[in-house]
Amino acid sequence: MITDVGYRRLLRPLLFRTYHGDAERVHDRTLAAIARIGGNRLALASLARWFGRHCKPTTVAGIQFPVLVGLAAGMDKDGLGIKTWGSLGFGYVELGTVTAQLQPGNDKPRLFRLPESRAILNRMGFNNHGAQALANRLAVAGVSRGNMAVGIPIGISIGKTKNVPVAGATEDYLASLRTLAPYADYLAINVSSPNTPGLRSLQDPKALADLITALLAEAWQLASGGLPVPIFVKVAPDLTEAALEDVVQVCAEAGAEGLIATNTTLSREGLAINDQPLVAESGGLSGAPLTRRAREVVRFLAARTSLPIIGVGGIMSRDDGQAMLDAGASLLQIYTGYIYAGPALVNDLNQLEPDRAPPC
């Protein structure tokens, strides 16, 4: 309760006013502060006591997650806060989306808050320092696949470099996989961001089948007789039911280990009146306006596949998290909900019960 009130009434209003409301600058400074905490053992221990995770583990794709809720991709693209997220209550973190090549992303401004709608609009464009830079950071931190060096599993979202044509996308993804597979507990294939031209065309059945098949073949090669890194596919909320059917079939037949539903949406439905001036801005919308659609997609997918689903999109409260689990999600991720509700949301979601939780 103290954490909730303190964040909503004091810290969030302060952050939203800082730098004249420049959301990206606030994000960068906040992430830098979180990274600094990771170098202070006393601070990490104090956070862990305050935001201590409830021990309710669940196993998905052979990975044991200490709790259900993870940090979604986009918050920490380059892994700056890897040592801190577990102490803030998260059961796993998905880094990225990263690309094979360093890229600056789209022109600024490219990140907007819509506070009355409890939403965020972004067109970041996969700004990141590249797959090799992330691999180097993880190596320095002692991270390797399965070793839980930072106390929680690490997923990595990989995407297509903007200046690589769609025809060359597979080799671009393969380059990222080769670089990052030794460090990732799972890889998420981002083919659904609306902010890289042509990317969503990779959700078309043949393109997606070819991509997953190539990545799985390479993952088996890298595994050297062991099990390959699990590969999840992140889907868009704007797909039709027929397209979602195709995605499910392709992922199951090609050997993907799971689905992540959903990415941001191009829809502008559900925005408050005072946020309407931002309707014309390009980019993907996340937060409360996506809550119902993301849940619908998860329910639709869960009814058609036994593949595990990570539910993400519009989880703004404990009730939203429970509804996502009821729709068929095996794990949860948050991003925009964390911006608006703060650490108390993580604690609330961690109290939800995963199905068939093994003993700690």
Image (cartoon, helix red, strand yellow):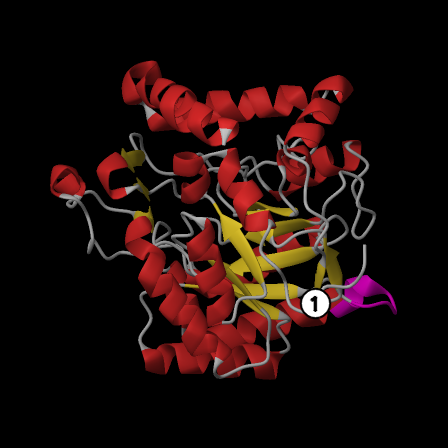
The residue lying at 56 percent from left, 35 percent from top is: 129
Q: Quadrant of residue 228?
A: bottom right
Q: Position of residue 15 (x, y in %)?
A: 38, 21
Q: Quadrant of residue 212?
A: bottom right
The residue lying at 78 percent from left, 63 percent from top is: 358
- The residue identified by callout 1 is 61
The residue lying at 82 percent from left, 36 percent from top is: 142
Left or right: 245 with respect to 179? Answer: left
Q: Is residue 246 magenta?
A: no
Quadrant that contains the C terminus: bottom right
> Which element carries disc 1, helix, strand or loop?
loop
Q: Quadrant of residue 85?
A: top right
The residue at the far front in this view is: 1
Residue sitting nearer the eye, 352 or 252: 352
Residue sitting nearer the eye, 15 or 252: 15
The residue at the far top in this view is: 19
Residue 98 makes an appearance in the image: no
Above or below, comparing residue 31 to residue 130 in the picture = above
Q: Position of residue 218 (x, y in %)?
A: 71, 66
